[in-house]
Image (spheres, rainbow, N blue to C red):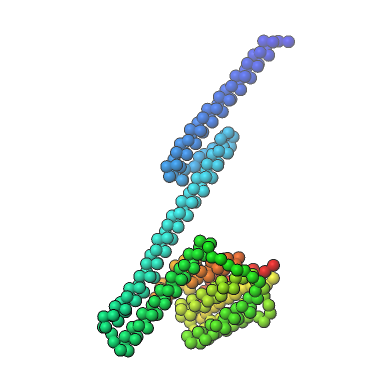
Amino acid sequence: MNWALIFGFTTLLCSCAVCYLSAKLWRVKEQLHVIQNALEDIESGNVNRRILARENDMTKSICYSINEMAINGQEQVTRLKQSEQSYKRLMTSLSHDVKTPLTSLVGYLEAIQAKIVIGDEKEEYIGVALDKAHHLKDFVESLFEWVKLDAKEQQFQFEICDVNELSRDILADWIPMLEDKQFTYEIDIPNIECSLRLDRNAYRRILNNLLQNALLHSGGNKVYIHITEDDKQASIVIADNGKGISDKDLPHIFERMYQGDLSRAGNGNGLGLSIAWELVNVHGGTIHAQSPPNGGSQIIINIPKAL
């Protein structure tokens, strides 16, 4: 046996192993230096920083995890910026929707107090001031309701209800108001039972908000209420024959405080549809709007059936 040959081969093999491990350690050291720099960069606020790694790098999983953390951080920063912009828009809308009627209300009351108006005109001013006070009260109540919904603090009492019967009861209260506003109506509700898991007050609020929106902003003179069902869900459609919803406004009408250009002059507060969206969501349902080319608009609600 040639021990010298074996020793030489073993030495060569060990040398190769040492060289390989040295190269690996050098690569790891280099990667650790890159990782350290990247972490310092991310810590300083650069959430766009990413670490490149080769497929056979020992630090590959660490690099991928850091990149994933950076991506999540970037998404959080984006959401925070969007939330901040939304908050600023909310404050602007609140300022407009509170300041404008409040300034007008003060003006009417000051005119009455200073006796600038007397007799019938004074009574007229008192009536207008009262209307504006009620508008502010309704706005504040809607705002608090929306805040509670958004913060998930609203308490609900769900029970199995016949949505057809409940809807008929709600609409019965609306018929005198529709007739007073010179609106005609078409109600198509099946005479069979359709069981849904509902909070009665929340469902009433949904229909009330949608019908009020149709009266205030549709510009039409007729509303349609249709309820249908299939094996999985019930669909409630509230439609009107008004001017419809513009393509620009359609994607945003359920956003908080959003008011389209044509509705800004009305008496709405931009919260009714947002509250309806939140309440439908609580019921595990969906709500969306359509505005056919031939005019009018439709709000479609889908609520899953009780199992």
Left of 278 or right of it: where is 303? Answer: right
The quarter of the picture where residue 170 lies is bottom right
Report x, y in % for residue 5: 67, 12
Q: Looking at the image, which residue sits at the far front? A: 113
Q: Position of residue 154 (x, y in %)?
A: 54, 65
| Residue 3 seen anywhere in this rendered image of the structure | yes
Pick whichever, 200 or 235, lies toward us.
200
Q: Is residue 298 visible?
A: no
- Residue furthest bottom in the image: 120
Q: Say how many tags the image has.
A: 0
Q: Residue at x 56, y 75 (%)?
A: 204
Q: As drawn, which residue projects farthest toward the right?
A: 1
Residue 226 placed where, x, y %? 60, 79
> Which corner quadrant holds the N terminus?
top right
State the residue at coordinates (32%, 75%).
106
User: Can you give x and y, in whole percent of width and height, for residue 207 in the image?
Assistant: 55, 75
Q: In the picture, residue 201 is in which quadrant? A: bottom right
Residue at position x 48%, y 82% from top?
220
Horizontal side, residue 298 vs residue 134: left or right: right
Relative depth, front residue between 92 and 27: 92
Please give left or right for residue 287 compared with residue 45 in the image. right
| Quadrant of the image containing the C terminus | bottom right
